[in-house]
Amino acid sequence: MARPPVDLVPADAPAESLTHNTLNGVTGGIWRTRRDGRPAVLKLLAPPGRPGPTHWAGSADPGHWNYWRREVEAYRSGLATTAYPGLAAPAPLAVEDRPDGTVALWLTDAPGRPGTACSAADLGEVAGRLGAGHARWLADPPGRARPGPDRAPDWLARDWLRDYTLSRPVPEPVPWEHPVAVAAWPAPLRAALRRLWERRHDVVAATDRLPRTLCHHDVWPMNLVFADAGPVLLDWSGVGPGPVGEDAANLVLDTFLDGLVDVALLDEVAATVLDGYRAGLGRAVDPATVTRAVRLTGAAKYVWLAPLMLTRLGGPTGQTYDRRDEAEIMAGRRPVLELLVRWAATALD
């Protein structure tokens, strides 16, 4: 949708369409505009039924990983703006239920440096604040909003990591010896990725034994703004209980997968994020467990990525953010996949 509906933003008013995952059936559009004379962001949320890929379909089940109203509830309850005191969230301005069943979520605009212009130090700072936020939830039932009821809200994602990971559409057999794959990825890497894929259920099950906290589930540069007062974390549509380490692992891997940040920074970011996250958690979890948790949850989160890439060779890449061609994606993701299999090897021993 190029512009928001005219009943929300008049045709002569400014409306800048913001980059987002257009495959996700929940998101009808995101625009930077104005409300009541002040800068604002409008996010249009759509109920289930929009055309699109099945694995990105919205759900009416409150516990589903892609429940369509979760972000509205996160803001209405105050959870989005209070979950992690060191990471701000945009303030909600209004929530409007519309006659066509969609919901208009109005938020304050978050001015600042975009997350894709980050340095390793920036991401280390985010990781430290994230770790401190996760530490405070370890003492409470995971996902309980403060001040909270005795029972976690039913709109929190029930098991986001498992549900998301195992719903990715990887058709079998995976062409591990495809000529493009052979040219781009050495045999040891392909073999390690294949073993990881074959063990996917065991890898995901292993994350169940990690300490649990309240996870955002989509911490990456596109959801970060570096404001003068500190980092701002956007998109609370996946919030819910999850294993310690998951958000930090995603911050490392997803920073580089779409070619938005120079992959030459990968090793520095991986080390800086892990150090920052461990420091933020403090004594809440012992450092060895934190290290293993980051590596294990990273492997679980992206266990599907390489096989899915291989099944799509020669066709559309299915990418929303990544504008590289097939060969560039294969080469650019190789260092990230090599880190992934190293993480898996150490975390699963």
Image (cartoon, rainbow, N blue to C red):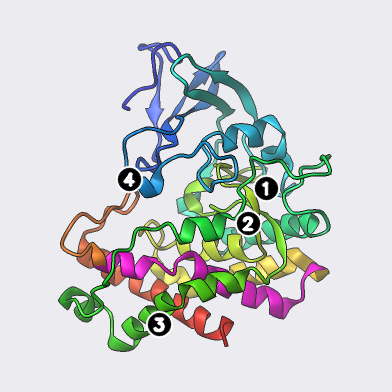
Is the stretch drawn in magenta largely helix, strand or loop?
helix
Q: Are marks 2 and 1 in contact (CB under 8 Å)?
A: yes
Image location of residue 330, percent across then percent down: 27, 69
104 to the left or right of 173: right
Amino acid on which the number 3 mark rests in the picture: Arg
**In whole angstroms, how far apart are the C-alphas of marks 3 and 4?**
27 Å
Q: Which mark is residue 126?
A: 2
The residue lying at 41 percent from left, 78 percent from top is 198
Q: Which mark is residue 53?
A: 4
In terms of sequence position, does the residue under pointer 3 or pointer 4 come before the other? 4
- Crowd tier of the residue under label 2, counting other residues whose Cα lies within 10 Å: few below 14, some 14–19, many 20 or above: many
Asked if residue 190 can be seen in this view, the reply is yes
Q: Would you name the residue on which mark 1 appears?
A: 87
Q: Nearer the viewer, mark 2 or mark 3?
A: 3
Amino acid on which the number 1 mark rests in the picture: Leu
**Above or below, comparing residue 193 to residue 146 in the picture:** below
Q: Which mark is residue 195?
A: 3
The kind of secondary structure element at disc 3 is: helix
Residue 303 is a magenta residue: yes
Amino acid on which the number 2 mark rests in the picture: Val
Residue 220 is a magenta residue: no
Q: Which residues are magenta?
A: 284-310
24 to the left or right of 86: left
- Crowd tier of the residue under label 1, counting other residues whose Cα lies within 10 Å: few below 14, some 14–19, many 20 or above: many
**Above or below, comparing residue 41 to residue 142 in the picture:** above
